[in-house]
Amino acid sequence: MSERIVLGIESSCDETGVGVVRLYDDGRVELLADEVASSVEQHARFGGVVPEVASRAHLEAMIPTARRALAASGLGLEDVHSVAVTAGPGLAGALLVGLASAKAYAAVLGKPLYGVNHLAGHVAADTVQHGPLPSPCLALLVSGGHTQLLLVEDLATKITEIGSTIDDAAGEAYDKVARVLNLPYPGGPPIDRLAKQGNPEAIAFPRGLTGPRDAKYDFSFSGLKTAVARWVEERERAGEPIPLADVAASFQEAVADVLTAKAVRAATELGVGTLVISGGVAANSRLSGLAGERCAEAGIELRVPRPRLCTDNGAMIAALGAHLVAADVAPSELDIAADPALPVSTVSI
Amino acid sequence: MLVLALDTATPAVTAGVVALADGSVPRTLARRTTVNARAHGELLTPHVREVVAEAGITLAELHAVVVGAGPGPFTGLRVGMVTAATFGHALDRPVYPVGTLDAIAVAVDGAEPLLVATDARRREVYWAAYDAAGNRVTGPHVQRPADLAERLPELAVRRAAGQGAELYADLLGLPVAQPWHPSPDALVAVAAKDLLTGADPAPLTPLYLRRPDAEVPVARKRVTRP
């Protein structure tokens, strides 16, 4: 069997992504194209993703993005060996656009369709940049919609969630704190920028679920967000100026501290030598910085894909599809349904 | 010419292969219709494969795609639109959008002014009115059936078609004719002139008729008491 080309389609939230990868016989996955159309600006004034706005944008962007990806790859549709698409989890109406399109591509090409898990795709994104993952490895997935610790024994078949947020996702906490500080949506980049000028130890914000009786691998960011709001409101009421940079830095420190402490603890306790951090929040400078320090101390290899691969994209879905092809996993039927709550243990449906 | 016709703007998931020739009415070679408002995404492409097989052709033998552009409930409508757009891209064939209500109107026998109404959910209907010659005189609109009923005297329609007309038949007080949903040959009939002349297709813009439900947040909610 020679090289195989996999087309990947992603539409679970507010990015329409189409990626193209080449799978080599030795299992290596090469990135050929990664085109993304984002509707983030249309959501900004609402302070969060509006599902119907996102779905409308996916419909408009789907074919143009696919055309751009194919053009960038230098290949034609006739070269495609398999089509991979996000089947869940995500916004129902948004997922449906990419899934319907992928089915039609697969039907015309007469090629296999793989309906895949978006979260597993975030882990697969790293293999495009850093090569195959060792087995087992641990993945920390942090984005606006997800905060999870995953034990990855086999990217194509065996992923187990060992912890997740019990309330807000980490990225959601960033967006909410950004509103408190009158910073724009999405909150991650402006808070990260502001935090660089502040003192991360200025305010002792709480570290959620870090007590001795708390679930050791689960996360909670709702209390942290409320603590920041309360701190700011009390200063406002007293007529005192708000030290924005210190608030941002102290909040960011609390998030990065909890995420990295729990991830490193899990890796150590489970005897796993590699930690992958992916998802939109992985682009946060303090999170990757602190993870680097703590992984080095604990003798754990840290892998963080470049920011472009961390946020939602089609290349990660193509990459996951390539791993499924390489592992001889059975393809999906053309009548599969999108599953907004697809558990991460289901890598493909 | 062989045309693939799709519509997902009503609870019916419709796919058909239609033969179209100059000077004759479109002829359906194979069709699948499943009435299930929650299964558009699951069923549409499987239906396409079935009708193509039943018509004894391959997808590559199709000359064009016609798709109902609504109005219709958003999620289902998008399935048909993106599926048609993808078939168009992958087959390198033109895709012609047509009004779903127009495709229902064209299939109604007889020459009397006609109201077409489909179910818009939320206790509203999508509707349009047609004159005796079959030309659309107003619409498509989305409205509550009671408000539409008030406009009926000025519209001077004599009968109605579409599932929305059947659902609210008591309020509208018009005899309801078939069909409830658009058929493949009717979808192709609406686009027949453009198909036969090879006209440039209109952009694939869905007829949503409603804005997304979204509110711009006003002031942030405080967590402490003032």
Image: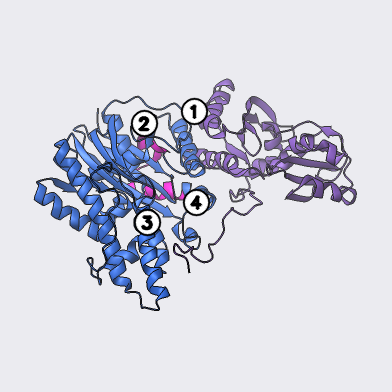
Chain colours: A blue, B purple
Q: CA distance from mark 4 to mark 3?
A: 21 Å
Label of residue A173 in the image: 3
Work out whether residue B63 or residue B82 is closer to the camera in this orientation and state it: B82
Q: Which residue is mark 1?
A: A335
Q: Nearer the viewer, mark 2 or mark 1?
A: 2
Q: Residues within 10 Å of mark 3 (few under 14, many from 20)?
A: many
Q: Residue at x 27, y 67 (%)?
A: A195
Q: Position of residue A86 (x, y in %)?
A: 40, 39
Work out whether residue B65 or residue A259 is closer to the camera in this orientation and state it: A259
Callout 3: residue from which chain? A
Q: Position of residue B213 (x, y in %)?
A: 59, 53
Q: Nearer the viewer, mark 3 or mark 2?
A: 3
Callout 4: residue from which chain? A
Q: Position of residue A260 (x, y in %)?
A: 21, 51
Amino acid under disc 2: Ser
Q: Tally the marks.
A: 4
Q: Residue at x 25, y 60 (%)?
A: A253
